[in-house]
Amino acid sequence: MLCNELSQSLIKIPDSKKKLIQEIRLRCNKPIALTSGKETLFVCKDGSIIYSPGPRAVRSLKHHIFDSFRSLCGYSVYSKQNEIIDGYITASNGSRIGVCGTANIKNNEIISVSDITSMNIRISRQITGISNELISKIFPLKGGVLIVGAPTTGKTTLLRDIARNVSTGNGCRIMRTTVIDERGELSGGNKGSIDLGLSDIFTGYPKSDGIMQAIRSFSPQLIICDEVGTDKDVDSIIKCTNAGAIIIASLHAGNTDELFRRSQTKKLISTCAFKNIVILDSSDIPCKIKEIIRL
């Protein structure tokens, strides 16, 4: 989905390195930076990896950014405006791309973003079986699960595999599972390129709307969604619990101390919807469980 000049270098990266790369950062007139765990890497034209942004590193020029951005938007930038205003777009394969540029303001609100200067492409992957350990530790569920971790610790990857396993009864009893995929990341967007088993998937719905529609029409036993924390999310989670559905969701926090300092955590715990908090380790291994807190 990137412009040909950039993709030709990236595609030559050795497979052993490719599978470790979590992000591709494009900055106007700067070297392409690759995130691998805690490391930042750079790529040469022949696909070799170097560890400093020297003269051999491939640079993303202004026209590379422009062409790649249009391609990632499916050549319909207008249709992505609402996402762009929120600072991201979701590619057709479910990869989430952070974008920044020049904000155009009207009445103290961002109405559009122009002159894109940086993009951060977060690689969307499915790792089959990555949730097996967690399922063995917390199932059968007695209540909801809040999965907590810093960026790139694998929260979304873990949620995907939980949905696949639980909806098909792999390692646990089958539960009627609904996935609220607000940004298209969990399922791989409108192409549904990621296997979520027998889950019913609400793509593009705001979490609060998706949860209520699922409860009204699909009688889910389990609802899975990403990145909760707003007041509307909390209200929806309360309604979800009152309707008898269990919820599994994720929340950003770097560690336990940071988690319990956040006002969102107090609100979410106060709903009594969550019985387990799963803390993911900030390591190079995705979805590595550091701690399970029983509430």
Image: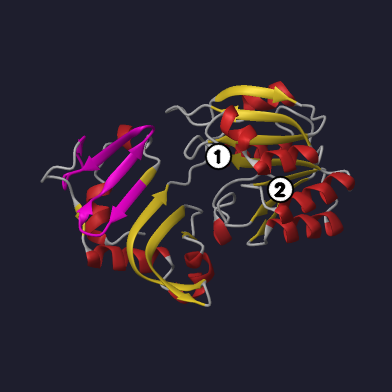
Task: Look at label 1 and name its amino acid.
Answer: Thr
Q: How crowded is mark 2: few (under 14 residues within 10 Å), some or many (20 or more)?
A: many
Q: Kindly identify which residue carries mark 2.
A: 199
Numbered disc 2: secondary structure: loop
Left-right relation of 266 to 18 = right
Residue in view at x 57 percent, y 42 percent: 156
Task: Look at label 2 and name its amino acid.
Answer: Ser
Residue 267: x and y, percent? 74, 43
Q: In which quarter of the image is the N terminus?
A: bottom left
Residue in view at x 17 percent, y 44 percent: 44
CA–CA distance in space, label 2 to label 1 = 15 Å
**What secondary structure prevails in the magenta region?**
strand
Left-right relation of 164 to 3 = right
Q: Nearer the viewer, residue 117 or 51?
A: 117
Q: Residue 157 carries which label?
A: 1
In this picture, is 7 found above or below 81?
above
Residue 281 visible within the image = yes
Residue in view at x 64 percent, y 33 percent: 260
| Res 53 → quadrant | top left
Q: Residues within 10 Å of mark 1 (few under 14, many from 20)?
A: many
Q: In which quarter of the image is the C terminus?
A: top right
Please tell me whether mark 2 or mark 1 is closer to you in this view: 1
Residue 154: x and y, percent? 52, 36
Question: In the rendered structure, which segment of residues is drawn in magenta?
Answer: 24-51
Numbered disc 1: secondary structure: helix
